[in-house]
């Protein structure tokens, strides 16, 4: 996973990545549009895809549709409040069981202990 810290305390997270670009290191400033990594299938996933999150300064998830494809000149332009409103139809998903085949892979990669946590 790559986590980027932006102005106003916003954080973006990119998960299930393949090869991460060599320029991506802690503390390095990036230009908008710079490549981060290749899409991958790390952790417990059913195939290559990108997990993308935007979180506010209090680590609350924000709806990325309010941010994608837009630029913001000033902090007051950021759609923090509307992006933080969640439809009552949205449900959080929790992994209740990990298939044995994926569990073994995760243990070998050090992503999961033998005890399962």
Image: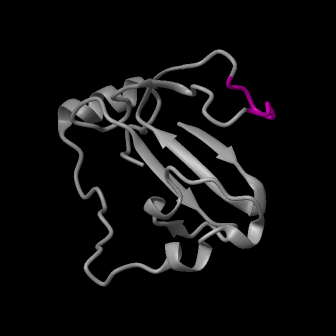
Task: Name the residue rendered at 51%, 72% in the picture.
Answer: 83
Query: On the picture, is 55 further left or further right than 86?
Result: right
Q: How is the image coloured?
A: one colour
Task: Name the residue rendered at 38%, 45% in the picture.
Answer: 115
Q: Is the residue 69 above or below the residue 106 in the image? A: below
Question: Who is closer to the viewer here, 46 or 113?
Answer: 46
x, y percentage for residue 39?
A: 39, 27
**Farthest bottom residue?**
88
Identify the magenta region: 24-30
x, y percentage for residue 45?
A: 28, 37
Query: On the picture, is 23 further left or further right than 86?
Result: right
Q: Is residue 80 magenta?
A: no
Q: Quadrant of residue 111?
A: top left
Task: Name the residue rendered at 57%, 25% in the picture.
Answer: 35
x, y percentage for residue 13?
A: 55, 46
x, y percentage for residue 113?
A: 43, 39
Query: On the picture, is 81 further left or further right than 106?
Result: right
Q: For the stretch drawn in magenta, what is the main secondary structure?
A: loop
**Farthest top residue?**
22
Task: Name the residue rendered at 32%, 35% in the picture.
Answer: 49
Q: Is the residue 78 above or below the residue 96 in the image? A: below
Q: Is the residue 40 above or below the residue 84 in the image? A: above
User: How many numbered marks does the figure carry?
Assistant: 0
């Amino acid at each position: 996973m790559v986590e980027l810290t932006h102005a106003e305390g916003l954080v973006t997270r990119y998960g299930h990545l393949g090869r991460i670009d060599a320029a991506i290191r802690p503390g390095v400033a990036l230009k908008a549009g710079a490549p981060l990594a290749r899409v991958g299938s790390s952790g417990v996933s059913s195939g290559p895809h990108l997990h993308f999150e935007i979180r506010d300064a209090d680590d609350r998830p924000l709806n990325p549709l309010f941010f994608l494809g837009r630029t913001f000149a000033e902090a007051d332009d950021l759609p923090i409040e509307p992006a933080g409103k969640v439809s009552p139809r949205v449900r959080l998903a929790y992994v209740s069981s990990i298939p044995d085949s994926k569990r073994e892979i995760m243990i070998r990669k050090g992503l999961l202990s033998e005890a399962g946590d």
